[in-house]
Image (tube, rainbow, N blue to C red):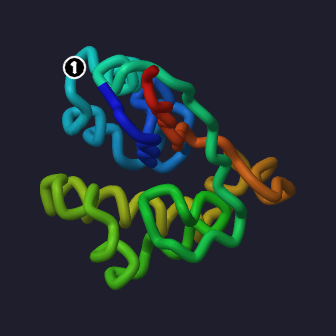
Amino acid sequence: MARCRVVLFNWDPSSLEDSWLVRDYLPGFARLVPQGYALEQTLDALGGGRIEPVPIPHDCRDGFMHAYWRRPGAYLDAGVRAGISVFGLLEPDEVREAVERLAADLDSGEWERRNGALLDLEELDLGYRLLVAEPTT
């Protein structure tokens, strides 16, 4: 149990299919998510608390997996991908194929046809959460 406030930045695996990146290009990411894991398990282990959503702004500069949700061309950059652990954990052929499909969809306009509504959003909830465990009395 937490004796002082504990704040963890985490990702909710129940949001796996909410991202165009995973749904359309990296479905193998699901293999990396522990079966049956839920954020509530971690919070319970800390003695309880609350879970707060952390929407990602469209111009996020951090560079984590979903930071470029409104700038899909960034995922074509090998330097960007090198800073995102998921790309290193997936098979190289899987990543290459995903990047090729994304490049083709960006060139053809297919990405925008499927996801164009995102271009009007300022932020998006893609499952990132703060887990806040408060001190027990």
- Quarter of the rendering occupied by the C terminus: top left
Pick the front one: 1 or 110: 1
Q: Residue at x 49, y 31 (%)?
A: 134
- Mark 1 is on which residue type? Gln
Pick the front one: 10 or 47: 47
> Could you say where residue 53 lies in the image, as x and y percent from the top left?
63, 38
Determine the residue located farthest toward the bottom in the rendered image: 79
> Could you say where residue 93 lies in the image, as x and y percent from the top left?
16, 59
> Could you say where residue 81 lies in the image, as x and y percent from the top left?
34, 72
Q: Is residue 96 left or right of residue 73?
A: left
> Could you say where residue 127 lies in the image, as x and y percent from the top left?
54, 37
- Residue 56 found in image quarter: bottom right
Q: Is residue 98 left or right of residue 23?
A: left
- Residue 78 found in image quarter: bottom left
Badge 1 marks a residue whose secondary structure is loop
- Quarter of the rendering occupied by the N terminus: top left
Q: Residue at x 51, y 36 (%)?
A: 132
Q: Is residue 68 left or right of residue 64?
A: right
* Mark 1 lies on residue: 35
Q: Residue at x 21, y 53 (%)?
A: 94
Tell me if residue 63 comes above or below residue 117 in the rendering. below
Q: Residues within 10 Å of mark 1 (few under 14, many from 20)?
A: few
Pick the front one: 123 or 53: 53
Q: Residue at x 55, y 60 (%)?
A: 105
Determine the residue located farthest toward the right in the rendered image: 120
Tell me if residue 55 comes above or below residue 96 in the rendering. above
Pick the front one: 22 or 126: 126
